[in-house]
Image (tube, rainbow, N blue to C red):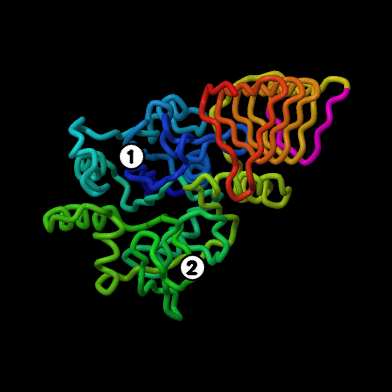
């Protein structure tokens, strides 16, 4: 149990290019895998690692985030000795909200000061993985490093955008890419940082005093030569979801049983907000193959190589191929969709044909009627 570790999910200025999928919600609550949200993966990883106190630094469009997380009971984070804490910006001033994450950390410094934990794990929500933080923390303590960064050797990012790093023969990080530049490296930072809480607070105050307010770019990158920044090599599945194409490609990976098992069950289960629905119903003539179909769906037509969220209705003669249909979608009779992403409550009227491409899927915004 990591009772001496505080979890922080940092949603300040999370980079995303998911177009209408993040028009009314933050990146952390984008639906994924037929019934989950992106934030479920890192939050479940923390809980499974014994981290019982987690702070979520909300930023903008966080109504859906609050609705999804609630009291944290679905992740067993609603107990007295720890818990889930939502920390939105203190001010409504647009200029203040636009400032970097260190400014927001400083606004909530009392939260850190009141905590008895000595270590902090800081993560983002768009790194799709199932990770046990316990060996990471143990290795961090044993190495004597100031900061440990979880990394993954991965050349194919499936159009996701990630910060790359370079390390020496001992695994010490020698260079960190600024944003998503042209560093020649196949080593990706998973944006997971482990450090002592007092070091974090010192970096916050020192950087802000210098007029700098970004954790990675200013507080960490500028001190690569001064601090001992160690890498930890992650061996499991990593998906980077911050573009429409990367969202689609990583979603389609869930149709591979080996990837599904690795991401959702190893080393622990992924939890989400529970919604009771009846089992999916298949009528006479329904055909499905290689698809994820959630509870509450009604399948009368054909579903091939697709992901259907709760309550989707595929009517007779309709064909759904290589597509993602979110909650309560309606695919009407004799319609045909291929390489399409439909947000929640989208209706495809009778006889319509929609076709996108694997590298550029057609995307329909929430509640749209086509």
Residue neighbourhood size for the residue with mark 2, other residues' Cα within 10 Å, grouped as few (<14), some (14–19), many (≥20): many
Label 1: element kind: strand
The quarter holding residue 174 reads: bottom left
**Residue 144 at x, y = what percent?**
35, 69
Q: Magenta region: which residues?
A: 285-294
> Which of 203/355 is in front?
355
Q: Mark 2 points at which residue?
A: 187
Q: Is residue 8 visible?
A: no
**Residue 302 at x, y = what percent?**
79, 30
Does residue 292 belong to the magenta stretch? yes
Q: In which quarter of the image is the C terminus?
A: top right
The quarter holding residue 339 reads: top right
The quarter holding residue 290 reads: top right
Is residue 214 positioned above or below 65 on the image?
below
Residue neighbourhood size for the residue with mark 1, other residues' Cα within 10 Å, grouped as few (<14), some (14–19), many (≥20): many
Label disc, if present, on residue 57 of the rendered structure? 1
Residue found at the very far right of the displayed protein:
284
> Which of 360/7 is in front?
360
């Amino acid at each position: 149990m990591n009772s001496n570790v505080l979890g922080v999910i940092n949603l300040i200025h999370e980079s995303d290019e998911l177009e209408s999928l993040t028009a009314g919600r933050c990146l952390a609550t984008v639906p994924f895998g037929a019934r989950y949200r992106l934030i479920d993966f890192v939050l479940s990883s923390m809980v499974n690692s014994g981290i019982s106190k987690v702070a979520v630094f909300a930023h903008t469009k966080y109504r859906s985030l609050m609705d999804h997380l609630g009291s944290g009971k679905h992740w067993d984070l609603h107990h007295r000795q720890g818990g889930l804490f939502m920390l939105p910006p203190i001010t409504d001033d647009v200029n203040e909200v636009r400032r970097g994450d260190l400014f927001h950390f400083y606004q909530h410094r009392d939260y850190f000061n009141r905590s008895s934990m000595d270590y902090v794990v800081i993560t983002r929500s768009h790194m799709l993985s199932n990770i046990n933080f316990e060996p990471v923390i143990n290795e961090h303590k044993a190495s004597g490093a100031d900061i440990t960064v979880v990394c993954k050797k991965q050349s194919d990012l499936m159009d996701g955008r990630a910060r790359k790093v370079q390390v020496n023969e001992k695994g010490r990080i020698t260079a960190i890419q600024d944003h998503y530049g042209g560093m020649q490296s196949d080593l990706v930072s998973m944006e997971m940082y482990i450090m002592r809480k007092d070091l974090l607070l010192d970096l916050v105050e020192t950087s802000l005093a210098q007029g700098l307010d970004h954790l990675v770019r200013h507080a960490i990158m500028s001190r690569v030569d001064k601090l001992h920044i160690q890498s930890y090599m992650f061996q499991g599945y990593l998906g980077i979801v911050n573009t429409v194409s990367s969202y689609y490609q990583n979603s389609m990976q869930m149709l591979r049983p080996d990837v599904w098992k690795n991401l959702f069950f190893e080393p622990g289960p992924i939890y989400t907000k529970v919604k009771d629905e009846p089992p999916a119903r298949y009528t006479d003539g329904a055909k499905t193959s290689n698809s994820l179909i959630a509870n509450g769906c009604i399948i009368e037509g054909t579903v091939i190589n697709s992901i259907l969220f709760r309550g989707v209705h595929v009517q007779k003669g309709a064909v759904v191929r290589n597509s993602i249909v979110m909650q309560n979608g309606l695919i009407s009779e004799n319609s045909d969709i291929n390489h399409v992403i439909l947000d929640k409550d989208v209706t495809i009227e009778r006889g319509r044909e929609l076709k996108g491409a694997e590298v550029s899927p057609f995307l329909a915004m929430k509640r749209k009627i086509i």
